[in-house]
Amino acid sequence: MSGRKRVLVVGGGFGGMYAARHLEKQLPAGVADIVLVNPENFMLYTPLLPEAASGTIEPRHVVVPLRRVLRRTRLIVGRAVSIDVDQHTCTVDPPEGEDRTLSWDRLVLAPGSVSRILPIPGLAEHARGFKTLPEGIYLRNHVLQQLELADAGDDADDRRKRCTFVVVGAGYAGTELVAELQSLTTRALKAYPGLRPRDIRWILVDVAPQIMPELGKDLGRVALRTLRERGVEVRLETQVKEVGPDWVRLSDGDEIPTRTFVWTAGVAPHPMVARLGLRVDDKGRLLVDECLRVFGREDVFALGDTALVPDKGTPRGFAPPTAQHALRQAKACAANVAASLGEAEPRPFRYRGLGLLVNLGEYKGVGRALGIPLTGFLGWFVTRTYHLAAMPTWGRRFRVALDWTVAIAFPRDIAELGSLGRDDARAADE
């Protein structure tokens, strides 16, 4: 048996993929094997998911094949269903076949997060999430299908339900999703002679007094004004009280008829984290020190949405759950894993954020880069430039840039690819 140590990375998102990538540089091949477990063989570039959902970018272009960027890491596709931190084992459920058990000497936890579901009647049964590529593809297909059915139907009440779209959560995901899909439906109306602009209704709901509070009040007001000028109804300081199959009731008493209800109001750590028996905060995030070691363990590290990472450079003293912070945490985590194996010096996590950027569609954006506020076309241009530079591999950058160029010159594709992400595409169904 080889005398090399094994470093197991759980999760192939920003934190996990980049941690493995940096580990390849930090650890000599003869010292340790690196193994990454992930449900898919790709990393989703989540900041561009709203544009993939709207059809601006081809969905395959917002994912990065893990085998293309990880040269020395062994990829195992499957779900990590349980981890025994005392026995140093991890049970993996593959897409087919029986579960397998992996041993490890060092563990890096970066399984990401899931949508946070509140105890609201009807929410779990009728809400759609927006965190994964299948959810993004489904939502695009669903919105286009509603336009098709509304255009073909004669019932006014049914048409009103199908043309009303409700999104809850005015953070980055919800705001960018509404901006992109509202643009899609507005531009698509030329292809639907039975529909008029006044028929389409987009509603963004949030309990907070402003959208995207991380941007600050001034930039938040700019984003709010931009959306409202485009016809988006923004309901602030409003809660969802109940959700039905074709309606949603709000705290202001309004009952909105709709066939589309999307929930983006917050995330929670992966459920597996709660079963590890390790220390967590009141939101279920693992407690780690400044070297990303889990409290009470010298062989377990955590980063990204899974961990509450100390960061003295932020007002709250902890790193926000953003992609740019996960990227830098991955580099520090890899160095500290290598240090625990005697191959590097410990490296506390320190990072001053570059800023926050939001794409509002229709050549408009808002954000703050290096302390400088950006709005309008400049905000949109800087947002796209940043994401293009941050996208891993030149091949993916070229594909995304080409998609953006095509979108400028030609109308968006409104084909409904209904079989994507479904299990019923069998030959017997043809």
Image: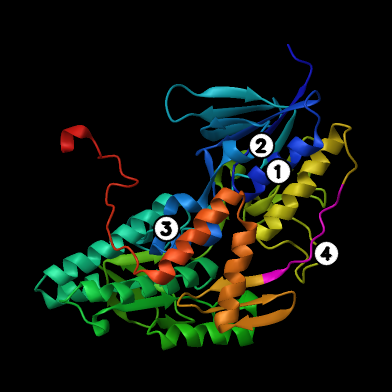
Residue farthest toward the left in the current orientation of the protein: 154
Task: Please state the horizontal and vertical placement of residue 401, each as a whole percent of the image.
Answer: 52, 61
| Distance from the alpha carbon under mark 1 to that under mark 3 | 27 Å
User: Above or below — where is 178 with respect to 402?
Assistant: below
Which type of secondary structure does the marked residue at label 4 adopt? Answer: loop
Q: Which residue is tagged 2?
A: 9
The kind of residue tagged 4 is Lys
Query: Residue 19: which disc?
Result: 1
Q: Secondary structure at mark 1?
A: helix
Look at mark 3 in the image and give the residue it sits on: 129
- Work out whether mark 1 precedes mark 3 in sequence or the reverse, and give the earlier one: 1
User: Label 1: few (<14), some or many (≥20) within 10 Å?
Assistant: many
- The residue depicted at 57 percent of the width and 33 percent of the height is 82
Asked if the residue at tag 2 contacts the one at tag 3, i.e. Cβ–Cβ closer than 8 Å, the answer is: no
Magenta part of the chain: 347-355
Q: How far is mark 1 from mark 4, CA to CA?
A: 22 Å
- Circle 1/circle 4 CB separation < 8 Å: no
**Sequence-first tag of 1 and 4:** 1
